[in-house]
Image (spheres, grey):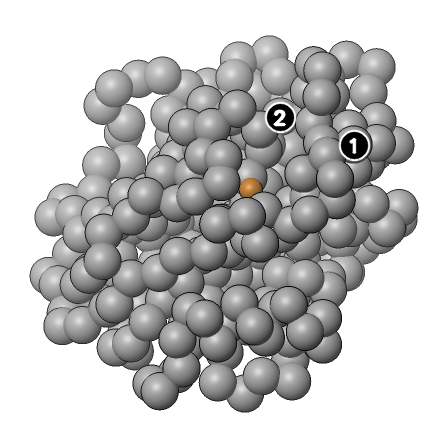
């Protein structure tokens, strides 16, 4: 499952590799909601043990003090989180594990940020979150406890939110309409013929990829050179994922698909 998470879609890995490649009542309210809240801190996730399938909103919150990842996948029946951890520990290409399925999560979320991701989860079974971001000693957070899951069963009557705006990826470019400051619900739509990731971040003034790489690799000490408000690792062709996130007025954001060399920037009025 972690194939894309680790190899190509994991934003921080891409950075380390030097890859070139408000409002309390948001307009896009989800009704009825089927919400699974996942809180990340150093070094664990707090989440329910069970969840209902169908349309699910994964409400991801970073309540810790460093950037965390919410890599996300499903494990086939008969396998456990311990098997997943052992598989990740082996250092093999995660695509070698046919029982683990990458579902694309959030590769980086800054402290204090939260993002709601609404998508369909139809397969019953075990779903897992894990974090590959290293601590100051270079140890991935999942080895320190950031690997956890829930069991999914049944089908809720929840429906997708009505988005405030739609960001479309084609195989050539991102199309980004005017987005509102504050809490907003955006449809991330893959209209291309390949999978696309929607990595979202915003550099602090004067900062760039090199600053972020150094800062993450050395354990995120000192002021953050970047803000990660929540993007998503990959979206299957012809499908959409809905994100409810918070954007700051006057801030310039970068939206990037590292693997396919798509990048655009936009400023929120
Ligand atoms: Cu972490």
**Quadrant position of ligand 1:** top right
Q: Is residue 192 above or below residue 255?
A: below
Quadrant where the C terminus is found in the figure: top right
163 vs 209, nearest the viewer: 209
Q: Which one is in front, 123 or 188? A: 123
CA separation in Å, label 2 and label 1: 17 Å
* Image position of 115 (left or right of 121): right
Circle 2 sits on which residue?
Answer: 227
At 75% from the left and 44% from the top, the residue drawn is 138
**Which label number is shown at residue 143?**
none
**Mark 2 packing: few (<14 Cα in 10 Å), some, or many (20+)?**
some
Pointer 2 or 1: first along the chain:
1
Asked whether 114 or 159 is in front, the reply is 114
Q: Which residue is mark 1?
A: 218
Q: Residue 239: in sight, yes or no?
A: no
Work out whether 156 lies above or below 15.
below
Using residue 221 as the reference point, say whether residue 48 is left or right of it.
left
* x 25%, y 19%: residue: 24
Q: Picture coordinates of residue 119 (x, y %)? A: 34, 59
Q: Residue at x 64, y 33 (%)?
A: 201
Residue 122 visible? The answer is: yes
Q: Is residue 215 above or below residue 122?
A: above
Q: How many marks do you count on the picture?
A: 2
């Amino acid at each position: 499952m972690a194939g894309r998470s680790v190899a190509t879609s994991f934003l921080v890995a891409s950075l380390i590799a030097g890859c070139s490649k408000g409002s309390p009542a948001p307009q896009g309210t989800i009704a009825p909601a089927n919400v699974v809240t996942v809180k990340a801190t150093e070094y664990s996730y707090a989440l329910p043990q069970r969840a209902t399938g169908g349309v699910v909103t994964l409400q991801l919150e970073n309540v810790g003090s460093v950037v965390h990842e919410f890599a996300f996948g499903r494990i086939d029946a008969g396998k456990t989180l311990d098997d997943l951890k052992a598989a990740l520990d082996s250092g093999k290409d995660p695509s070698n594990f046919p029982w683990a399925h990458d579902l694309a999560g959030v590769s980086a979320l800054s402290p204090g940020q939260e993002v709601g991701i609404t998508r369909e989860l139809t397969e019953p079974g075990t779903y897992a979150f894990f974090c590959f971001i290293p601590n100051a000693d270079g140890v991935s957070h999942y080895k320190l406890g950031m690997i956890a899951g829930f069991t999914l069963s049944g089908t809720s009557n929840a429906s997708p939110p009505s988005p405030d705006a739609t960001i479309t990826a084609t195989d050539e470019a991102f199309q980004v309409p005017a987005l509102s400051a504050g809490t907003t619900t955006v449809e991330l739509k893959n209209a291309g013929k390949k999978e696309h990731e929607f990595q979202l971040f915003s550099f602090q003034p004067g900062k760039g990829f090199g600053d972020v790489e150094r800062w993450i690799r050395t354990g995120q000490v000192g002021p953050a050179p970047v803000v990660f408000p929540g993007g998503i690792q990959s979206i299957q062709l012809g499908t959409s994922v809905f994100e409810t996130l918070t954007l700051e007025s006057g801030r310039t954001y970068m939206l990037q698909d590292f693997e396919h060399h798509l990048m655009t920037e936009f400023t929120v009025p």
